[in-house]
Structure formats: structure tokens, C-alpha cells
């Protein structure tokens, strides 16, 4: 009798541990599934057109509903000290695929501008400004600049979640 009583006691002690383990798995799966359901809708939290600004569109169900063709893409480094302009062809720095990505995501234009500004400093231009003229046709609309070509990208206040302070708004036409 004593051995059977010990077996019953040990089974009773193991059950709460197994249940607690299952409870953790269930909670983890529930949180994971809720995240997987809600994360694609995060674009609703950001202002403006998510395709135009490129914010909140990755890993969402909206990521392939845009088409862009570029009609102009030019970067200019300005040497303020010596009053010189240097027009740069992005194809000297980027592959074709990278250029295609550049026109889809304004943040990449900013990143290339920062790279060009740092490269200018390395080459002896201490007070460099970088300007980008990137004109695209977006989803069949007439062409427009993604950002103001007269904006020195080295001087903008960058916020990765809200690009409206330097990316031009999307025109309706």
C-alpha cells in the first residue's frame, strides 16, 4: 500500500509542473499569433501614404501595391568652402538593383546622401552639403520629385518613423 500511495503522490506533484509548462507554451503561442496578425497593420499608425513614404510597408500585406519608374536621379555634393558643385552618378556607387530600391524607399536616398557626405569629408571637403534630385512616376501619376532637390540632406532632422519633414507629399495627379 505504501508504494501505491507514493506513486499517486508523485503523479499529483508532476501534473502542476506539466500544466504550468503547457500554460507557458499556450501563452507564447497566443502572443506570437496575435503579433503575426497585428504587425502587418502597423502602417495604420504612421501618417501619410505608406507606399510613398516607405514607412510601415515592409512585412505588411501592402508591400507590393506600388510601381515607380524614375525619370531623374542625380546627387550633387556641394563644397561650401571652395564654392564647387560635384554632380555624382549613383550608378558609380550602386548596382542597378540598389538604384531600383533607392527609388522605392526615401530612407535609402538619405542613407546614400550620408555616405556621400562622409566620403566628401574623407576626401578633404569639410563643409559638404548633399542634394538629391530624384524624380519618379508613382502608380501611373505624373512625375514628381520624392524630395525637394534644394534640400541639403546633411542638414535635415531625420526621423525614421516620420519622413514628412523632408519627403515631399504625394501629388494626387
Image (cartoon, rainbow, N blue to C red):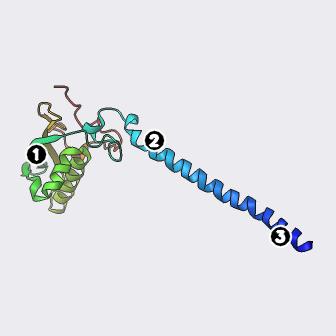
Q: Nearer the viewer, residue 8 or 130?
A: 8
The residue at 16%/55% (across/down) is 97
> Left or right of 106: which side holds 75?
left
Between disc 1 and disc 2, the foreground one is 2
The residue at 40%/39% (across/down) is 41
Q: Quadrant of residue 159?
A: top left
Quarter of the image with the C terminus is: top left
Q: SS for tag 3?
A: helix
The furthest residue to the top: 173
Q: SS for tag 1?
A: strand
Between disc 3 and disc 1, the foreground one is 3
The label shown at residue 38 is 2
Give the percent coordinates (x, y) of residue 127.
18, 52
Q: Residues within 10 Å of mark 3 (few under 14, many from 20)?
A: few
Distance, label 2 to label 3, CA atoms, is: 47 Å
Between disc 2 and disc 3, the foreground one is 3
Earlier in the chain: of badge 1 and badge 2, it is 2
**CB contact under 8 Å: marks 2 and 3:** no
Give the percent coordinates (x, y) of residue 5.
88, 68
Earlier in the chain: of badge 2 and badge 3, it is 3
Quarter of the image with the N terminus is: bottom right
The furthest residue to the bottom: 3
The residue at 50%/47% (across/down) is 33
Amino acid at each position: 500500500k505504501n508504494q501505491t500511495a507514493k506513486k499517486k503522490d508523485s503523479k499529483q506533484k508532476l501534473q502542476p509542473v506539466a500544466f504550468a509548462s503547457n500554460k507557458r507554451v499556450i501563452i507564447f503561442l497566443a502572443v506570437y499569433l496575435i503579433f503575426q496578425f497585428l504587425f502587418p497593420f502597423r502602417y495604420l499608425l504612421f501618417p501619410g501614404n505608406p507606399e510613398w513614404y516607405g514607412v510601415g510597408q515592409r512585412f505588411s500585406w501592402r508591400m507590393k501595391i506600388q510601381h515607380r519608374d524614375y525619370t531623374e536621379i542625380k546627387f550633387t555634393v556641394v563644397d561650401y568652402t571652395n564654392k564647387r558643385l560635384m554632380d555624382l552618378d549613383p550608378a558609380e556607387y550602386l548596382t542597378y538593383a540598389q538604384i531600383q530600391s533607392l527609388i522605392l524607399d526615401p530612407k535609402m536616398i538619405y542613407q546614400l546622401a550620408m555616405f556621400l557626405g562622409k566620403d566628401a569629408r574623407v576626401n578633404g571637403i569639410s563643409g559638404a552639403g548633399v542634394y538629391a534630385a530624384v524624380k519618379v512616376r508613382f502608380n501611373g501619376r505624373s512625375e514628381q520629385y520624392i524630395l525637394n532637390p534644394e534640400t541639403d540632406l546633411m542638414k535635415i532632422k531625420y526621423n525614421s518613423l516620420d519622413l514628412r519633414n523632408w519627403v515631399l507629399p504625394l501629388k494626387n495627379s
